[in-house]
Image (cartoon, helix red, strand yellow):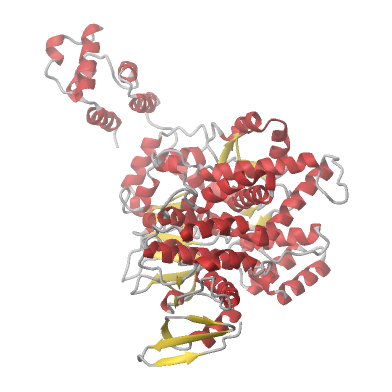
Amino acid sequence: MTELSHRTRLYKKIEDNLSDDDVRSLKAMLVADEHLGQARVENATPLEIMNMLEADNKVGKGNLALLVDLLKALGKTKLAEEAEDVAKWEGTGGPSCTIENVISCLKDLYAREHARVRPLPWCEDLNLPLGEVFTNLRHQRRGDRGRFQDTDTIVSLADIFKKTEAKDVRRIRVEGDPGIGKSCSCQKLAHDWSSGKLNIFKAVFFLEIRHMSGKVKDAIFEQLLPEDTNMTPDHLWSYIQENQDDVLFILDGLDELSQTAREVTDVVALIQGKILRNCHVLVTSRPYHCVKDLEKCDEFYKIIGYSKDDCVEFIQKYFTETPECAGKLVEEVNCNQNLSEIVVNPLNNVLICIVWEDNEGKLPSSPDELYQMIVYSISKRYCTKNSIPLEGGEIAPTVEGALRALGKLSWEGLEQDQLQFNINDIKEKFGNNADDMLAIGLLTRDNSFSRIKHSCFCAFLHKTFQEYMAAYYISDLVKKGSKGENGKECLRSLFGMTVATASNVDMELMSANRERYREVQNMLLSILGDTSGPLFEMFAEELRKDECKREDSDLLSFFCIMFLGRSCKAGRTSCRLAEIVAPCLSHITNDVSKHDASKSFKYDQAEWIDGLIQVVRCQRTFAVNPDLRSIRHLTVSCDEMCGMVLQQRQLDILENSLSDCDAISCVTLLQSTLYIPIVTSEGREQNLADIDD
């Protein structure tokens, strides 16, 4: 591409972006300053005016100062910057940094920065080879009914873009639960390219979406290239446009794109093929986020996490110097069902090894307890390092205050879609707590952010830490009687509840909040356990509202019962919580697929069964009291549970109670006996009685 073509392209862009008023102002400025005469510019287009300026030597090769000043006077700052870039490019006889230099910089960066993983920055000795922590992908296909079905095919990252005769794959979606290894998989793909294992691509751009605040072309320079790169974003973008088939974008964490950034960035347009449609794109996200943004992807994959053998191998590598510790921990994992479910997640596996070291062999039974223990370990290390006394193992009040402040920062950040925090703002807002907040070990300077701003920003070690701290903060408010109202306000915001005086139920808001705050909701319910009564009192309020439509009522009942199941999942709650909502539940169904807001609940069928068991137990005690309402109608759709992974206890209950029926209707509760008329697929009616939990 010649030097003139860069300038011509700039001129064309200027012409396309000037309004009629801008053109009139431009002509007036040129005439007033005697650069061009009135007669010459009167009927001229912007492109003709710029050609006149060239002919009069007002602008020329490497000299676009007049044009820059004119554009700034018109308020076209972005165009002025591009004019400065073109002048710089022309003044040096072309960019000294070629595309080969850029590719070399990218390969050096990936080889250097992504060869090892340091999952917890405060653990300086925990620096793991990438190959030990990344996990392969299981292929997932969309079935005829629109559902995703596992093929049990393990896929190598290096093979996922290989062309087949049937399909030329351009855009790939990778799903995975928090901490399951999505970012590690992206690192592995970039590192493979840098070492020559993915040579089907000439250029690979690995971008963290959480750090994006503008266009993709600018993010490449902010996140990946050295400050002294002598190539403009527009020049690199031109190369990408002309070589799309040879370019791969790895976009990590679409679910972490803030709403503010979404309004200005073109990353979603890139994912959907609205720009650079022939480029290859791999994008990661949590499984229940950004579904509409990802609908145009050609293939879908999910991260399956560690197998049992992977888990054991990692533990043994972690405790290389103390194999006896490894053996004891492996034994615990093998015999503890709750623990074996937690360690499938690679991040949890790392945290469990640390907790085992720091807590003399004490282990968690749930994810929230794991995070509670790791936060305590981080706090204890901080106290020891700074000679802060630990009285009876209790964290000092100043450090406790810093943790509560971090929780407040976490929750307010999530409400504003904020994963990065300005350090100066933290110091100004939190005063005396700020120093402890920044130094305790849960926040790290966010060095992947813009080269200009990164020193002023920080972020949590992982988004799940921010979500746990938010749940910790809200649980603390709910448990404190003196601040109960603040706790209730947070619960309403978190779960999408309408105010108590409202006459309607906003199921769209509840559904949206389930997608947005799923992990916070789950952790909070587990933390609160028996003390989550205020939440279910709010559900009872919603269920009593007379103006609730039937389909809203069905979904609200499902929502309530599912969260009841979440609360009792760890076995720490009694029937007391069910007693709060059971009198309000007359019609119960898990068939809520027809509701517009139901998509957020397709992952919650297992917990709904747990909650239903609690409600049934509770309603049996109500049956002897004619003044108390009981279930009038129960419908259980087997189709909705298709593909769900249920515990054996749940499967046994379903097998005994549902048999091969398609639906259950007209449930009657009579003392301790549950009589259920079952309509089978053949239309015959059968009776099942005395279902024992």
Horizontal arrangement in the rendering, residue 609 relative to residue 390 (left or right): left
Percent position of residue 298, x then y: 36, 63
Q: Is residue 566 something that shows in the picture?
A: no
Question: Residue 625 falls in which quadrant of the image?
Answer: bottom right
Residue drawn 62% across and 58% down?
A: 533
Nearer to me, 455 or 6: 455
Percent position of residue 40, x then y: 13, 13
**The C terminus sits in image quarter:** bottom right
**The N terminus sits in image quarter:** top left
Horizontal arrangement in the rendering, residue 465 relative to residue 170 (left or right): right
Question: Residue 34 falls in which quadrant of the image?
Answer: top left
Nearer to me, 618 or 337: 618
Q: Is residue 484 something that shows in the picture?
A: yes
Horizontal arrangement in the rendering, residue 8 relative to residue 193 (left or right): left
Q: Considering only vertical position in the picture, is 57 above or below 622?
A: above
Percent position of residue 21, x then y: 21, 21
Percent position of residue 535, x then y: 58, 56
Residue drawn 44% across and 36% down?
A: 97
Nearer to me, 130 or 401: 401
Residue drawn 34% across and 59% down?
A: 296
